[in-house]
Image (tube, helix red, strand yellow):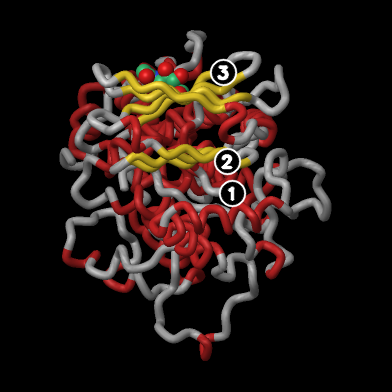
């Protein structure tokens, strides 16, 4: 069964779904409308959409017309309440996302992420209906259910209960099996070695920190600090996404990518949801670094750069990280400053230890980008993640990080994340005061000794340039 391309628009009274399904027999079209759920089946296409508000049921309110010359089927669905605004009709992944199913009550800690449009009592009926729709859809739902039923927030499972030494990883710890042969691939960013698949979470963190220490190179840092003409150019550059004022519309390519995202339910207790927002900050930071250093023109190294900078990829070690200063016992904010500082400090460390340009000021510019991108809401943030996904998807090895993180992140963001929380997060990222001492590598001391050296010997320019040449790493 194929998910057709489609788009939605609305009038006062109706929602209009336009579906591209060339060479079908119009007489074979089966349409079903049930409250907020719309489905259409015409071989080989199947589409099921969840709208935020109810529609009039079949015969009363639905009409369809097929234009055989263009292959477009236009379905007009009458709103149950005339004049009611249907929001987010452009977020295709949100319309496609399944609604929570009947298993919700059995796990009291699990909370529906999007509270605005998921009345709980409809779920069971919906699951029943879905079952009637097609076996394939049913299987998809079942798979989704078993995925999120994993103990996401439960205490660590007892070792005796583990049937294999496998530890899941990735988005909401849903994934396994992608890194079994990692030692035989050219994955240069994996910090867990051949046992990535079996490495327990605390060991992942230990290995990440150790690798960061190994890669940290004072001379490289000082060279970039002293000879920073090009880095200053990178810092002065403006990310077009942070300034554009055009009316936002996804491109055809973005729409197609959204259609192909996985169809899963992402239900999580409040704590994993909170951690997803923190992880989002690290993803956007890596994206911002690559975008800034390539001036939004990704290079063949971009996938490596993004993956190296993202601890959730390289060490399968996403936030939360231990806060740098004591956490306030109760914090009204969605994220507290100390945990956000710990999250960004990890990104900064990686930006100072791995890539070509290693500069605290550059990391600060990337943080400003993260705040500016978040402030523009989930549509734009999703666009950034789709760009990031595109970079990874085109890489022979690093595409796995799309599979275990980015694909799910895109769906979650589009279907369940809240613009209000993104706003709050943006303000918190922007208000943060990142200090060099948070990074752990005596940056202040290094910088002042570099400055003193220059003051003592201001004419050694030529010589120092030679020296810097030698200190720079070999081209990637
Ligand atoms: C992408 O989909 C949205 C929502 O249906 C639509 O408004 C937009 O025009 C589409 N973009 C293109 C280029 O077709």
Give the percent coordinates (x, y) of residue 265: 53, 53
Q: Residues within 10 Å of mark 2 (few under 14, many from 20)?
A: many
Q: Residue at x 53, y 38 (%)?
A: 38
Q: Residue at x 18, y 56 (%)?
A: 186
Q: Nearer the viewer, residue 93 or 439?
A: 93
Q: Nearer the viewer, residue 329 or 352?
A: 329
Are the two marked residues, 1 and 2, in contact with CB atoms closer than 8 angstroms? yes
* Ligand 1, image quadrant it occupies: top left
Lateral position of residue 191 relative to residue 371, left or right = left
Q: Residues within 10 Å of mark 1 (few under 14, many from 20)?
A: many
Earlier residue among tags 1 and 2: 2
Give the percent coordinates (x, y) of residue 335: 70, 44
**CA–CA distance in space, label 3 to label 2:** 16 Å
Q: Nearer the viewer, residue 459 or 117?
A: 117
Q: Quarter of the image for the C terminus: give it.
A: top left
Q: Nearer the viewer, residue 117 or 76?
A: 76
Residue holding disc 3: 10
Are the two marked residues, 1 and 3, in contact with CB atoms closer than 8 angstroms? no
Of badges 1 and 3, the one in the foreground is: 3
Determine whether the beta carbon of the residue marked 2 sits less than 8 angstroms from the nearest atom of ligand 1. Answer: no
Q: Which mark is residue 99?
A: 1
Residue holding disc 2: 37
């Amino acid at each position: 069964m194929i998910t057709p391309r489609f788009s939605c628009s609305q009038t006062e009274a109706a929602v209009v779904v336009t579906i591209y399904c060339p060479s079908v027999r119009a007489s074979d079209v089966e349409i079903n409308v049930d409250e907020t759920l719309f489905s259409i089946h015409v071989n080989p296409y199947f589409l099921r959409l969840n709208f935020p508000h109810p529609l009039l049921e079949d015969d009363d309110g639905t009409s369809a017309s097929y234009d055989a010359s263009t292959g477009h089927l236009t379905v007009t669905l009458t709103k149950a309440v005339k004049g009611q605004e249907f929001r987010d009709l452009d977020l295709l992944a949100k319309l496609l996302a399944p609604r929570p199913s009947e298993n919700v009550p059995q796990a009291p800690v699990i909370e529906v992420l999007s509270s605005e449009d998921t009345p709980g009592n409809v779920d069971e009926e919906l699951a029943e209906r879905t079952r009637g729709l097609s076996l394939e859809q049913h299987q998809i739902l079942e798979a989704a259910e078993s995925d999120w039923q994993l103990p996401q927030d439960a205490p660590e499972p007892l070792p005796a209960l583990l049937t294999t030494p496998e530890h899941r990883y990735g988005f909401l710890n849903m994934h396994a099996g992608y890194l079994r042969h990692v030692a035989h691939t050219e994955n240069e960013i994996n910090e867990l070695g051949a046992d990535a698949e079996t490495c327990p979470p605390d060991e992942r963190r230990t290995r990440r920190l150790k690798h960061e220490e190994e890669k940290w190179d004072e001379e490289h840092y000082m060279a970039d600090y002293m000879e920073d003409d090009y880095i200053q150019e990178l810092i002065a550059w403006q990310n077009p996404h942070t300034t554009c004022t055009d009316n936002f519309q996804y491109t055809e390519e973005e729409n197609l990518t959204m259609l192909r995202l996985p169809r899963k339910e992402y239900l999580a207790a409040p704590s994993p949801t909170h951690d997803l927002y923190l992880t989002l900050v690290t993803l956007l930071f890596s994206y911002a670094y690559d975008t800034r250093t390539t001036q939004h023109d990704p290079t063949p190294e971009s996938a490596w750069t993004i993956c190296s900078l993202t601890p959730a990829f390289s060490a399968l070690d996403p936030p939360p990280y231990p806060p740098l200063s004591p956490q306030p016992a109760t914090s009204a904010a969605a994220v507290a400053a100390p945990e956000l500082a710990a999250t960004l400090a990890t990104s900064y460390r990686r930006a100072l230890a791995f890539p070509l340009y290693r500069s605290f000021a550059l990391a600060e510019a990337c943080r400003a980008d993260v705040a500016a991108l978040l402030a523009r809401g989930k549509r734009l943030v999703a666009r950034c993640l789709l760009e990031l996904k595109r970079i990874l998807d085109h890489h022979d090895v690093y595409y796995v990080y799309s599979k275990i993180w980015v694909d799910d992140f895109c769906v979650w963001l589009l279907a369940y994340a809240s613009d209000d929380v993104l706003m709050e997060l943006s303000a918190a990222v922007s208000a943060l005061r990142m200090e060099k001492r948070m990074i752990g590598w005596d940056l202040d001391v290094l910088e002042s000794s570099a400055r003193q050296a220059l003051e003592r010997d201001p004419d050694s320019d030529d010589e120092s340039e030679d020296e810097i040449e030698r200190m720079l790493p070999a081209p990637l």
